[in-house]
């Protein structure tokens, strides 16, 4: 009930998850979670990163503007915590068939970010889908006890898995 994929190319995983979320919603699957939206605004600077809270029209900025010469992580952990709060609150309200998390990354490998939301969903028998880069794969597999399913980076196959898992989770 926990699956991930790796999509080659910058932003490819974000775009694929957004497409999958839209396809699932169109098929009547009650999806909660987040997908990342990257907004280019200046060719000399890195894009803004926002998380779209699924099931609402709410966006949360998770990137910090650190200046043109800044190096390293620019994640805004307060923004990430706000997004986690929104998703966790949505789970508490019920009526969720599937949770999508934009990625299993460094924060989740370190026990933070969406890790508790993922664990809660799995404990409540709600399937979870995420993307994962090669550098965080070992952390995801450790977290899942090796039980995560790797899917190909193909929207149709991912949607099929999600629909099947959501249907199984709804059975008594």
Image: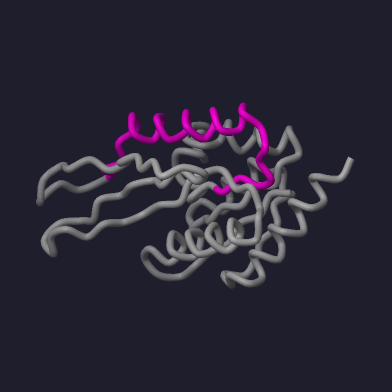
Tally the numbered discs.
Answer: 0
Of 116 and 133, the residue lying toward us: 116
Of 121 and 105, the residue lying toward us: 121
Of 53 and 44, the residue lying toward us: 53
Q: Left of 118 or right of it: where is 65?
A: left
Q: Residue 154's quadrant in the figure?
A: bottom right
Q: Residue 80's quadrant in the figure?
A: top left
Indicate whether residue 37 is drawn in magenta. Answer: no
Residue visible at 77% across and 59% down? 164
Q: Which color mode does the image show? A: one colour
Indicate whether residue 81 is drawn in magenta. Answer: yes
Q: Left of 92 or right of it: where is 132?
A: left
Q: Left of 60 or right of it: where is 158?
A: right
Q: State which region is magenta.
A: 73-100
Q: Left of 114 or right of it: where is 128?
A: right
Position in image of residue 100 (x %, y %): 56, 49
Residue sitting farthest toward the right: 172
Position in image of residue 135 (x %, y %): 48, 55
Position in image of residue 138 (x %, y %): 58, 50
Position in image of residue 52 (x %, y %): 41, 47
Vertical placement of residue 11 versus 84, above or below: below
Vertical placement of residue 154 versus 120, above or below: below
Residue visible at 15% across and 42% down? 66
Query: Which image quarter is the C terminus in?
Result: top right
Residue visible at 57% across and 69% down? 153
Residue visible at 19% across and 48% down? 71
Of 142 and 168, the residue lying toward us: 168
């Amino acid at each position: 009930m926990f699956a991930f994929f790796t999509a080659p190319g910058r932003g490819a995983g974000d775009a694929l998850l957004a497409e999958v979320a839209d396809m699932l919603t169109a098929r009547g699957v009650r999806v909660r979670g987040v997908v990342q939206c990257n907004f280019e605004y200046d060719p000399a600077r890195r894009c803004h990163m926002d998380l779209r809270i699924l099931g609402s029209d709410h966006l949360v900025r998770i990137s910090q503007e650190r200046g043109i010469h800044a190096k390293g992580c620019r994640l805004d952990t307060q923004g990430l915590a706000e997004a986690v709060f929104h998703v966790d609150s949505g789970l508490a309200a019920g009526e969720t068939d599937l949770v999508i998390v934009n990625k299993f990354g460094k924060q989740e490998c370190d026990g933070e970010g969406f890790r508790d939301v993922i664990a809660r969903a799995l404990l409540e028998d709600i399937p979870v889908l995420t993307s994962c880069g090669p550098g965080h794969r070992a952390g995801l597999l450790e977290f899942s006890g090796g039980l995560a399913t790797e899917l190909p980076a193909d929207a149709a196959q991912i949607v099929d898995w999600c629909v099947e898992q959501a249907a199984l989770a709804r059975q008594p």
